[in-house]
Image (tube, coloured by chain):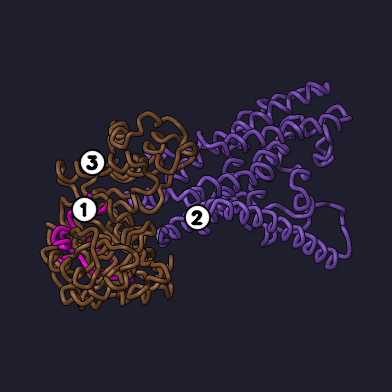
Amino acid sequence: MIDAQPPALPQEFLPRTDEPTPDLAVATRGLTKAYGRQVALTGLDMSVPTGKVYGFLGPNGSGKTTALRLLTGLLRPNAGTISLFGTPYTWHDRTRLFKVGSLIETPSFYPYLSGAENLHVLAASGPPTDLRRIDQVLQYVGMSGRAKSPVQTYSLGMKQRLGIAAAMLSDPELLLLDEPANGLDPGGMVAMRETLRYFTAELGKTVIISSHLLHEVEMLADVVGIIDHGRLIREGPLADLLDSAGRVRVRVAPDDMTKAAAVLRDLAPDRPLYGVDSGEGVGWFTVGVAPARAAELNQALAAAGVYASGLEPGSDLESIFLDLTGRTGNVAAPPDTRGPTAEAGPPAMGQT
Amino acid sequence: MRLIRAELLKARRRSATWILLVVALALTALIYLLIGRSIGGVGCDISFGGLDESCIVEFPASYALIDQFAFTTLGGLLAIVYAAAFVGADWNWGVLRNVIARGESRARYLLAKAAGLSIVLLIGCAIIFFFALAMTLLTALTHGIPIASPLRGNGLVDLVTNFGLGYLVVLERAALGFAVAVVLRSQLAGAVVGIVLYLGEGIITTYLTFTAVARYFGDSGGFGDGALQLVGPEWFQYLPMTVGNQVLSWAPGVAGNIAAGGLQGIFLRPVPLEQALPALLIYLFVAIGVSIVSLNRQEIV
């Protein structure tokens, strides 16, 4: 059957006791936060290396935004510690945030002020900010042309761009961006990616980007942390993560899905198996075997009378994310072809 | 200063600022138009306790209406609403988290907001005050009532004292609306609760005034020598809204004019200025203090 339960925590993700070091822009140890009886974070141990893009991933309600709010002093933790650039940070160390720029949740501005005026009033708070920086950041995010229009006339994507500009206003060492791609058009997403790449690669700054858009994070992040139920369940360089999770994607006819699932499960009995009927006459499986075993896999399918019409390396962030969080993805198959996939059933919206 | 300038920019650009100012000016003009229609006499006889209609357009007695209108009834109410909108909008629009996340001091931010608000109110009060002065002169001229200049005798001192005391009253009321909005984290809730407090205290003190007067009559068996302002000062005259009226009751042109004080002015002796003014300032600073403590404790979500 398709795995529905989150895997047990590997040994290396049990609570960390090591001290944060200066090469970590952000380190949290045992960070815990509850809203009344609702626990949002339960001992978050995250380590964000300086000068990297850190992809902070997790399902809805997993605690991502709460963690970012704690990092920016909006909330007080119930327990645990936060370190910024190697030194402890507490609720009252507000000036430490002078090195941090953030976009938390939705971008919020005075609707009756223009984009430039909003940045102007924002620049009056926090760290001393050169007002010439306003034009610069507006240019970074491609908003110079609409800088004088009231924010209430902006689309969601434009507000999002302005939010990113606001986060970059004081030339911070650390950028925290919560779902920055929300509402951005493809051009905007590419521009954001390039800007953030420049920010880290050329300027040596650090970016934490929380997103549901796994493909976007995969293209951008150097390091990822996956959070679920308020706890970090996986963290490490993205490349290592992708390498460690060997997968092959197999394309078969929908009618063959049941037969194929049995063969594939035999090949990797300890790894989760995902099946997707694309609904366009094609069924896809993602099977947990190293791409080097693709030929063996093809041979086994052929021996069972199933002919794969496609085989490709299948390790991607999405499959790793689904593995780790126990979410099943779009596992749906027509009633007559539901074999092994049927046990998992279609995903509920609330599950993903 | 950067923060205060930013607050002034926000206030200048915000339509609520201009709408409330226009409303205040329109109502002021309207009230003088109505007064003009009702004036029959020629000259103010203050010995009648300021109840003579002509007194309302003849200086210095006319300050009574100007002060009442610009600073207590209309001005005070608008100040509560505006202050709640001024500070509460930061929660409604979610912009507060931008500021806090940049490392700005919560106390400094609120103090800058309060300073910005006080400047905006100073300008607003001045506009309404001088507009009411102009309307007074215009109404007097229109009805052939001899114009007594607002600057005659102690004129300039009277003018400054009236404005100064009135502005303090407006500030105190605004501070109360400000504090309510910060504690409730909402401009609408701040304005509504502020108005309820304002009206509620008015209703309660009216009832308490009747009770005090009834108690006096019960004790003395009647009006005695027929003099007014027999009772008090009573404890409820120190309540946050009422104490402002007490301060203004000592303003030149208002003092001794029992018509200016409404029901309380007729029946109750005013709280001495040396008590009323400190009480007003205490309310003002406590309201700001409560706002700062509240914001410092708040989690911004």
Using the image, tell me which numbered label, if any, was put on residue A194: 3
Q: How many marks?
A: 3
Where does the C terminus of chain B fall, quadrant-wise?
bottom left
Is B74 left, or right, of B110 in this rendering? right
Give the extent of the magenta segment: A217-246
Q: Please rate how many residues cluster around mark 1, counting C-alpha atoms within 10 Å: few if below 14, some from 14 to 19, many from 20.
A: many
Q: Are marks 2 and 1 in contact (CB under 8 Å)?
A: no
Q: Is-magenta flag for residue A243?
A: yes
Vertical arrangement, residue A203 with respect to residue A308, above or below: above
To which chain does the residue with label 2 belong?
B
Q: What is the quadrant of residue A189 in the picture?
A: top left
Q: Is-magenta flag for residue B61?
A: no
Vertical arrangement, residue B39 with respect to residue A337, above or below: above
Residue type for callout 2: Val
Is residue A44 visible to us here?
A: no
Using the image, tell me which numbered label, if any, was put on residue A221: 1
Q: Residue at left 37%, top 72%?
A: A338
Is B262 left, or right, of B88 in this rendering? right
Residue nearest the viewer, comparing A35 with A47: A47
What color does chain A have in the rendering?
brown
* Chain in purple colour: B
Q: Please rate how many residues cluster around mark 2, counting C-alpha atoms within 10 Å: few if below 14, some from 14 to 19, many from 20.
A: many
